[in-house]
Amino acid sequence: MSKPKRTEFLERSSYRQRRFRDGARLLPVVALVLMVLPLMWPRSAPEQSLTSSGIIYIFCLWMLLILCAYVLSRVLRLSDPVRDEEARTPRGGE
Amino acid sequence: MISFNLLVLVSLAYVAFLFLVAFAAERRAALGKTGWLRSSTIYTLSLSIYCTAWTFYGAVGYAARSGLEYLTIYLGPTLVMIGWWWLVRKLVRIGRTQRLTSIADLISSRYGKSTVLGVMVTVLAIVGTTPYIALQLQSVTQSIGVFAASSGEAWMPRDFNSAAMWVAVGLAVFTVAFGTRNLDAHERHHGIVLAIAVEAMVKLFALLAVGIFVVWGIAGGVGPTLDLIDASAQSQLRPIAGRWIGLIFVSAGAFLCLPRMFQVLVVENSDERALGTAGWAFPAYLLLMSLFVVPIAVVGLDLMPEGANPDLFVVTLPLSEGRQGLAILSFLGGFSSATSMVIVATLALATMVSNHIIVPSWLNARTPGAVVSGDVRRVVVISRRISIGMILAFGYIYFRLSGGGTALAVIGLVSFMGVVQVLPAMIGGVFWRGANRWGAGAGLMVGFTVWAWTSFLPSFGIDAAISHSVFENGPFGIGWLRPQALFGITGLDPFVHALFWSMFLNTTSFMLVSILTFPNPLERLQGAQFVNVFDYSSGARTWSQSAAQAEDLLVMAQRILGGTAAQETFRAEAKSQGKVGFLPDVTPDFIGRLERELAGSVGAATAHAMIGQLTEGTIVSVEDLIAVADETAQIMEYSSELEAKSAEQERTARALLEANEMLTTLSIQKDAFLSQISHELRTPMTSIRSFSDILRDGEVEDDVRKRFAGIIHEESNRLTRLLDDLLDLGVLESGQVQLNLGQGSLADVLDRAVIASGADTGKLKIMRKPANEAVVVNTDLDRLAQVFINLISNAAKYCTSATPQLRIIVREIGGNTVVDFCDNGEGIPNESQSMIFEKFSRLEDEGKAGGAGLGLAICRQIMGALGGDVTYLPGQGGAAFRVTLPQTQALAAQ
């Protein structure tokens, strides 16, 4: 029995769409790393206040993430013709 | 000072307004005008029930106590929403295809529509949510108490209690009125969703207003506020790594697992595209909600008297500054936060309780088959209303028992951690086909137990639920079971300790038990449908052969879906089957679809059980699973067969096209040949006739007569030859040829052929390699010679070279002796190569052609009769023919 056909190479727009999806998957991972970053800031000098800089850092990061998510929501299409083929990749039965 | 009565009046007006909004939305939806009710803006705003009174009031208190840590509660959901492509999208798709009604339904449906798991998740959710509801009641009553105190009335605990009760009753009425209107959860609660969207706007507006007032009105701008922050005691609070990461994780998990969040995120979602908007808009909402928290906390600590409750700064700060309007707005914001959370949480829990506990028990209490006669619809609606009342009553009782103390403040996190115990079973169920109900059950049990022991019970305080000695020495003196130092690991933050052990043991037992046990067929089917949800447009079937009657099913469906909806479903199904009326054939597909419809009302497990009663338990078996797989395989095989067939047809069509072209060419050539043959026949006949006329008249001299007779003889010979050729071909073609088998040397046959063709005396130079020709052949030597003669004389006739040469090469290829005849002429053009062996075919150059175009056709027929072949050999620098001698003869010759 022959395997169902699967497109190996995509045209330009579908290719872009796939990369946007990769971006959408990557975003939360990067976001998590950046959110945890303040834990690694130097904490030796007690007189040096971190709270206001921490607030500025977190909120700037937050706005950046919202902007990225906004851009992604504009370019991501929920379904395109190739999506179904991507989903039809042969899987091992369980 | 603000009048307390005014506050009550404003609150009542606000509540009435919410009732009106919900009522109008329901009206619009009933008229089918759901356009903007389903917009992504409403969806995003409805997600804001994540921000409860705990965040509206409590975040400021949290910031006052722990600095920046409060942000993690918002960062977790931000991660989930900006990563919606990973998980939320899949959950929403599953929710729609499986018609999920709650998170308990998700777990139950995924793990083989298990009733037990549904009950477990429901109990877990109630235990985790009840304190949270109490917390909302507390925050509302406390904020009312602030106003009461400011208007000169000192509230007694009794007043708090009665206020909490009135709030609870009001919320129950609202939830019953708008939450149990539609039975099909798929039809969604437009009224409630719109009301909480409005409340979302109110609380955001209120908090922003207070924040702007604090920063610009009191502190004097952004710069001074930042200075104030750095100068405050909070600036010395550093985030603790374990808590920071753990809190982000817990809040992200709770965002997915909280029953009320699942309700708005998945169940009420009507359009996947709304996720794209919510993916950035909801984080933006959270950002705005948390923007002014630290400033309010710092300014509050700075201005308010020592010992003031930082949880209420949002209300008390404006009050102390004399901004009563702002204070009332702020109160309405907190009120909105509390009420919207309680409404949706109660609704979600009531759905779970009714679908997973009450209705299954009710079904069990009845004899099989009774589903048909019982009025399920009423039972479900009533059970939901009772559940709503019960849950709010639980919340109120909890509020009374806890005494509204500080214990409630920590309950938010404890509650989060409790519901997050569902996370492994949920994530595993959605991404891992190997997850099964034993594993899910084990994970939930272990997680729940560890959470209760290490977090929930200790949260009541030392000596409240767990005695001091147990904290110190462990139960029965078992040291490694101490609630805050499991396995003897001390020194961890209690929150991190509880989170780590509960999640670690939960996940491990979930996976380990899943690996070691075997799922039942229905679980495997559901597992495949959940994990590969994007592959299935509709669910695979879960029923095999059915004994149910269409009429029974219709009666039952009417009881649950209501008469009109059920009849419409059945009529549509009958129509799609090509039948008229309301009773379609009961196919497994139809039962599967009907079950999903019913699941939208009463949950997957109940729907499955009800259908199971009618179909007499003929549920899916492993054989059916394999049959389904086989069907898929067959379809795939069939389609590949079709593909092969169509390729074959293409080939046939191409062959036919070629044949047709050949036939057309041949037909043209035959016409030409006929005219030629009549010409060939007529020329000798004409001379024969005219010379015989002369001879008959008898007036010719002797030598002339002799010459004429010679001409007549020659012409009749030519005629005879032509006729012989035609006859020969006819005989060969009909297969009636007589072969005179004999044995001889190939060299002799070639010698004879060269001599007979007269080529040795002509211009054509023949080159041979006698050494190779010493092959003994066993065949009809005369016929073979005839073929050779034909080929040699063709070369003599058609070779266009000035010094014509013919190489005759004998060799052995693959056990066959072949004889190649290659001349050095122009060769035969490509397009003619397929034609030359056909009868009557001749190349255009007819001038030199003495024959009638039968020679090669005869050669091919002869070789065919002898069991060999003659083919044209292209690419030899001239015309080349390969005669393949029959193999048997060649073997015999050795």
Image (spheres, rainbow, N blue to C red):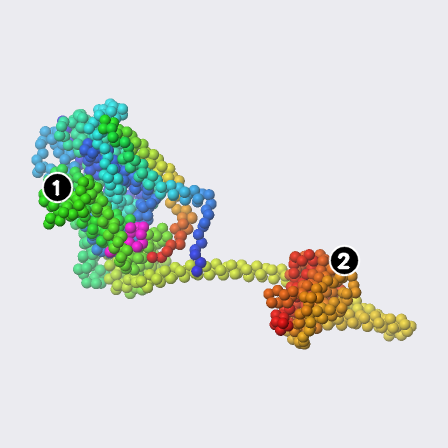
| Amino acid type, callout 2 | Thr
Q: Position of residue B40 (x, y in %)?
A: 32, 41
Residue B636 is at least partly visible in this image: yes
Mark 1 and mark 2 residues within 8 Å of each other at the beta carbon:
no
Q: Is residue B514 above or below residue B469?
A: below
Image position, residue B838 (x, y; %): 66, 65
Residue designated by label 1 = B461
Per the rendered image, the range of residues in magenta is: B428-438
Badge number at residue B876: none
Report crowding for label 1: few under 14, some 14 to 19, many 20 or more residues within 10 A (C-alpha).
some
- Location of the C terminus of chain B by quadrant is bottom right
**Residue at figure coordinates x 40%, y 54% from the top left:** A90
- Residue drawn at (77%, 70%), measured in percent from left and top? B718
Q: Earlier in the sequence, mark 1 or mark 2?
A: 1
Q: Share a chain, discs 1 and 2?
A: yes
Which residue is depicted at the point 75% across and 69% down?
Answer: B756
* Relative side of B119 to B596, left or right: left
Subunit bearing disc 1: B
Q: CA distance from mark 1 to mark 2?
A: 119 Å
Front residue (pair B79, B361) = B79
Residue assigned mark 2:
B803
Task: Determine the secondary structure under disc 1.
Answer: loop
Residue B853's quadrant in the figure? Answer: bottom right
